[in-house]
Amino acid sequence: EKFGITQALEELGVKNINNGTSTGADWFSSGGEIESYSPVDGALIGKVKATTAEDYEKVVQTAEAAFKIWRTMPSPQRGEIVRKFNDELRRLKAPLGKLVSYEMGKSYQEGLGEVQEMIDICDFAVGLSRQLHGLTMHSERPGHRMYEQYHPLGVVGVISAFNFPVAVWSWNTALAWVCGDVCVWKGSEKTPLTSVACQNIAARVFAENGLPEGISCLITGDYTVGEMMTKDKRVPLVSATGSIRMGRKVAAAVGERLGKSLLELGGNNAIIVTPDADVKMTVIGAVFGAVGTAGQRCTSTRRLIIHESMYDKVKGAIVDAYKQLRIGNPLDENNHVGPLIDKDSVKNYQDALKKVVEEGGKIIVEGGVLEGEGYESGCYVKPAIAEAENHYEIVQHETFGPVLYMMKYSGGVENALELQNGVTQGLSSAIMTNNLREAEKFLSVEGSDCGIANVNIGTSGAEIGGAFGGEKDTGGGRESGSDAWKVYMRRQTNTINYTTELPLAQGIKFDL
Ligand code: NAD
């Protein structure tokens, strides 16, 4: 059997492949079918039914009922449930990693890495469940005590993108669960089976512990299903990961009803290569950043801003490295670059290469769509490099594929920073330098304007311990580590008077 996928699906409890009801947990969807095709070989993997408006109503009511139970459980006990959920993730890491790889098209190693991120954030959340701290303050009034506490918000909506089909869900849910929230997840319509697999794992753990499945709900379908949630006042927080276009719509819909949104949108990430850069490290960071996951990471390297004194050397080394790249089946560990998610994405990639030439750019590593044996899905493309200028419209735009733009700067690092910050997005950024002054300038208030700024590491990938997200059109949201948990809770300030007087704040007198 091809790639062991059938076995992986069985282990994950994703049943009845290809007969129209491919889910183990299908109480949440009864509508039209969504077909999931693998970009690896173009085969139909399975079908999932979409959530209808009536299904959605049932889901939200189920979630609201579950919240009433879950919120009263002490958070360390909620942490214990997350720990058990994590045991299941550890047990099922291989089949889930494989399904991620086959349905999304990233390498098997990256599929496993994505599940590892789920495991890591769950570990983090378990510890956090005993650390949902508020502050205490000194009251200005005698005999008064003041402190703050954090309470859960309620139903948290999670909308996720195809490129991290499982990790983004867990970044949100693992924290939201220990915070006492329940979650309704709308995964990407391009990766419905990985969503079902995750839901099955969560549902089983909740059931085994006598808890309602409504703590974790799944809704399936396209943006219209997502819209049900963004417009729904019963969902106080919507965490949405995806394109900037989507973020604008979500922010407007959630803002209209004065809800909270946590936005994780597109990036346009650059590496600055200074005269003091280590060329070998630069090549590894830039090439992995640009072609890893076929350029389909929000943190993928899109632009290289290279000092003129280093330009030819770095360009030569990177062009040489591109010649070594093996493109093909991502489940084969010998390959570096797998497919794009679908043919629409291939078209966007082709359009970008056409556009950069029209705007005056020069292709230095040719792109193209691969054909023939092993490339039947039509989704495999060659990573390309173009010399371009920062102000080109296409360079300003995030093309979600393996297209890298190279440009020169002269003079000091401030000139490179101007180019780096001269885009509307603000997710990830990096500088390659051994010069302390340049590195500190890059990290200073005058430096990178991104949510992530790395020194001697590429732009791509992040650890779960830090808060993840970006500025400007990237949406401003932060999730995962540090104190990102606070967005999933409501803060309450409490003042207690233990005297027999009722003094007013600011010394105001109100005698009766
Ligand atoms: P997309 O915007 O097409 O879809 C993302 C999700 O939003 C899907 O589930 C989709 O159904 C839903 N959606 C779309 N329009 C909606 C609407 N109006 N209301 C409610 N839901 C809606 O993105 P994609 O192609 O799946 O993913 C690629 C994009 O995601 C890239 O721009 C990438 O940079 C970004 N991304 C960002 C991060 C981050 O953390 N910043 C992480 C991963 C991906």
Image: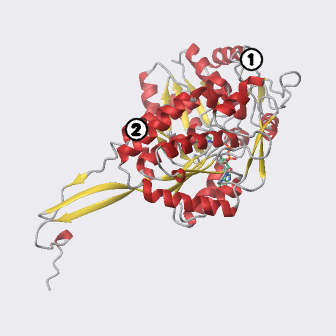
Mark 1 vs 2, N-terminal side: 2
Q: What residue type is labelled 2?
A: Val
Please identify, in this view, whether the residue under mark 1 or under mark 2 is nearer the observer.
Answer: 2
| Residue 378, x across and y down, in percent | 84, 31
Q: Name the residue under label 2.
A: 126
Residue 388 at least partly seen: no
Rounded to the nearest angstrom, the CA distance separating label 1 from label 2 is 40 Å
Q: Residue 422 carries which label?
A: none
Label 2, residues with CA under 10 Å away: few <14, some 14-19, many ≥20: many
Q: Nearer the viewer, residue 493 or 440?
A: 493
Image position, residue 23 (x, y; %): 69, 44
Which residue, as the protein is rendered here, is positioned at the far right?
372
Q: Answer with left or right where residue 100 lies relative to residue 154.
A: right
Q: Is mark 2 on a helix, strand or loop?
A: helix
> Callout 1, which amino acid?
Arg
What's the mark number on residue 326? 1
Q: In what quadrant of the picture does the N terminus appear?
A: top right
Quarter occupied by the C terminus:
bottom left
Q: Residue at x 82, y 38 (%)?
A: 343
Between 282 and 509, the residue placed more toward the observer is 509
Left-right relation of 375 to 10: right
Question: Which residue is nearer to you in this view: 193 or 302?
Answer: 193
Asked if one can make out residue 71 in the rendered structure from this viewpoint, the answer is yes
Left or right, residue 281 beside residue 223: left
Image quarter for residue 169? top right
Q: Quick check: 499 above or below 344?
A: below
Rendered position, 450 above or below 240: above
Residue that appears at 23% across and 63% down: 495
For residue 47, which quarter of the picture? top right
Q: Which of 438 and 490 is in front in this view?
A: 490
